[in-house]
């Protein structure tokens, strides 16, 4: 979604988007992401990765 918005803005202004446009700080400003949101998302990601690892290990054991 951010990419579409940035591309549209670039078309309207007549300039091409640069790699610098996609910095996390730009996205934070664009979406008003707060530190507590980042903390929650980090925790969810960590739990997801742990569950994937757990299921992968279980599958490997089951396949042996």
Image (spheres, rainbow, N blue to C red):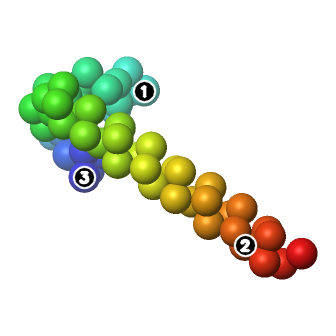
Dot 2, crowdedness within 10 Å: few (<14), some or many (≥20)? few
Q: Is residue 54 above or below residue 12?
A: below
Earlier in the chain: of badge 2 and badge 1, it is 1
Q: Which SS class for mark 1?
A: helix
Q: Closer to the camera: disc 1 or disc 3? A: 3
Q: In the picture provided, is 22 more to the left or to the right than 1?
A: right
Determine which quarter of the picture holds residue 52: bottom right
Please report contact status of discs 2 and 3: CB closer than 8 Å, yes or no.
no
Q: From this viewpoint, which residue is outermost toward the left?
A: 32
Q: Nearer the viewer, residue 48 or 28?
A: 48
Q: Which SS class for mark 3?
A: loop
Residue ID for mark 3: 1
Q: Nearer the viewer, residue 16 or 58?
A: 58
Q: Which SS class for mark 2?
A: helix
Q: Residue at x 35, y 41 (%)?
A: 43
Q: Closer to the camera: disc 2 or disc 1? A: 2
Q: What separation in Å lies between label 1 and label 3 (alpha carbons)? A: 16 Å
Q: x, y percentage for residue 15?
A: 28, 29
Residue ID for mark 1: 19
Please report contact status of discs 2 and 1: CB closer than 8 Å, yes or no.
no
Which of the labelled discs sits on residue 59, or is there none?
2
Dot 1, crowdedness within 10 Å: few (<14), some or many (≥20)? few
Q: Closer to the camera: disc 2 or disc 3? A: 2
Earlier in the chain: of badge 2 and badge 3, it is 3
Which of the labelled discs sits on residue 29, or is there none?
none
Q: Residue at x 84, y 78 (%)?
A: 63
Q: Is residue 4 visible?
A: yes
Q: What separation in Å lies between label 2 and label 3 (alpha carbons)? A: 35 Å
């Amino acid at each position: 979604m951010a990419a579409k918005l940035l591309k549209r803005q670039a078309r309207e202004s007549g300039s091409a988007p640069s790699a610098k446009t996609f910095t996390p700080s730009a996205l934070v400003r664009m979406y008003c992401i707060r530190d507590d949101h980042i903390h929650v998302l980090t925790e969810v990601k960590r739990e997801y990765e742990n569950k994937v690892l757990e299921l992968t290990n279980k599958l490997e054991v089951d396949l042996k």
